[in-house]
Amino acid sequence: MTMNTTPDPLIERLAGELEPVRVPARREGLAWVALAVAATVLAIELIEGLWRGIASGEASAMFWIANGLLLVLGLAAATSAVTMAGPRVGNAHEAPRWALAALGVLPLAVLATLATGGESHSPLADSHGLACALAGLAAGVLTAVTLVLWLRRGAPVSPAAAGLHTGLAAGALGSAAYGLSCPIDGAAHLGIWHVLPVALAAAIGRLAIPPLVRW
Amino acid sequence: MIADEPTLANLMRLSQQGDRQAYTVLLTEVKLWLERYFRRRVAPAQLDDLVQEVLLALHRKRASWDPSRAFLPWLAAIARYRWVDHLRKAYRREEAALEDHDAAEDSGEEAVLARLSLDRLLVRISARQAEAIELVKVEGLSIREASARTGQSESAVKVNIHRGLKKLSALVEKAE
């Protein structure tokens, strides 16, 4: 080991200022996200009321598939964003990409059905669609704030990716949370209007979050 | 030779607990490591500034290192982040020529260093982008001089620098 005999003033100053630090574990970040989602679901229950048909077996298979895919994407993106607070050459953030591709099958399936004449009603004629999309987007706000605060405590070295993954997580988890209150469980509604918040939140996150987490 | 990974990780662990003596040794070793890491990837006159910036970043963000993981990949990620940031800010400097600092390399850590290196980042952008960044941001040539040297138009040099830096900033954590 090499030791400089001449003390470096900066090193001396930094060593003089040193205080013990608490190292936040990754699971702590994930616990905060889980708490944010739980608080969001509670708020939705209080404001809109959750759909009771879920518990009584009225929900279609598509309801479970769409919300399941949203949840998987939300968990993958949230885990990725939480991990970005602790940088490391060699970290890969590939999982959200594949989860997003899987979710993308839903709108593509709706469009394919429309194109081949299998769906008689256009999703654009869905009078509840836009309200669902905006509510899903709003339901992601708490998750986004939680992740941004977490990232600001850490040292993200890819602010653009951190913003994108935070947006994906917030959009997907927000839409899944709001989905628990939505009784419209057809493929066209879920595949378009419940996926749209993910795209919107990802775009907002990519544009608005990097300046907030850059250091 | 510079301290190895287990020694540095141990010093960092002690530093996170507030051990000032260990921290002084750590920062001294890290400074040497960074000087070697940035060699030939930053104008010599700016090397000290960049090393100091990374030391300050290490100090400020020391809680973001997970003691259960290796230390050098964390340090390299921070060093790369600051380096890209530095390239963005770098303007024409008086010192155009780079000195060749090819000292004897330490063999033991070569494989690790190669994986973490800045060269590993530069090969991931196009040759024209890397050339434009190298000439203007590292060697300190003007856009016009870089254009004459490379045969690229002046606007192509600017575009290649802009796109190359954007891509580099997205690759900071890439190892392969």
Image (spheres, rainbow, N blue to C red):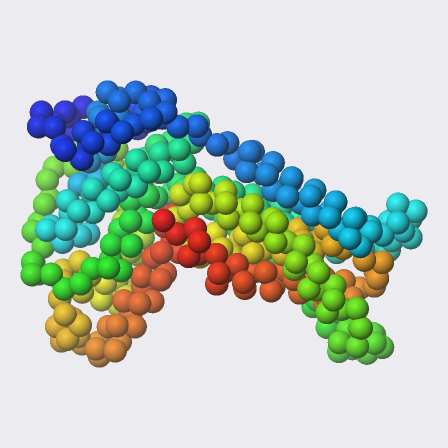
Quadrant where the N terminus of chain B sits is top left
Residue at 66% across, 51% down: A173
Q: Position of residue A123 (x, y in %)?
A: 77, 73
Residue at 14% across, 51% down: B46
Q: Is residue A160 above or below residue B16?
A: below
Q: Which of these two is toward me, B147 or A148?
A: A148
Name the quadrant containing residue B105.
top left
In-image side of B116 versus B138 (left or right)? right
In-image side of A80 versus A132 (left or right)? left
Q: Position of residue A45 (x, y in %)?
A: 79, 48
Q: Position of residue A213 (x, y in %)?
A: 43, 51
Total residue callouts: 0
Q: Which of these two is toward me, B119 or A4?
A: A4
Q: Which of these two is toward me, A24 or A57?
A: A24
Q: Is there any visible trace of residue A67 in the rendered image?
A: no
Q: Is there any visible trace of residue A210 in the rendered image?
A: yes
Q: Position of residue A196 (x, y in %)?
A: 66, 65
Name the quadrant containing residue A103.
bottom right
Q: Which of these two is toward me, B53 or B3?
A: B53
In-image side of A60 versus A174 (left or right)? right
Residue at 17% across, 41% down: B35
Q: Is residue A195 above or below residue A5?
A: below
Name the quadrant containing residue B18.
top left
Q: Is residue B74 above or below residue B7?
A: below
Residue at 74% across, 45% down: A42
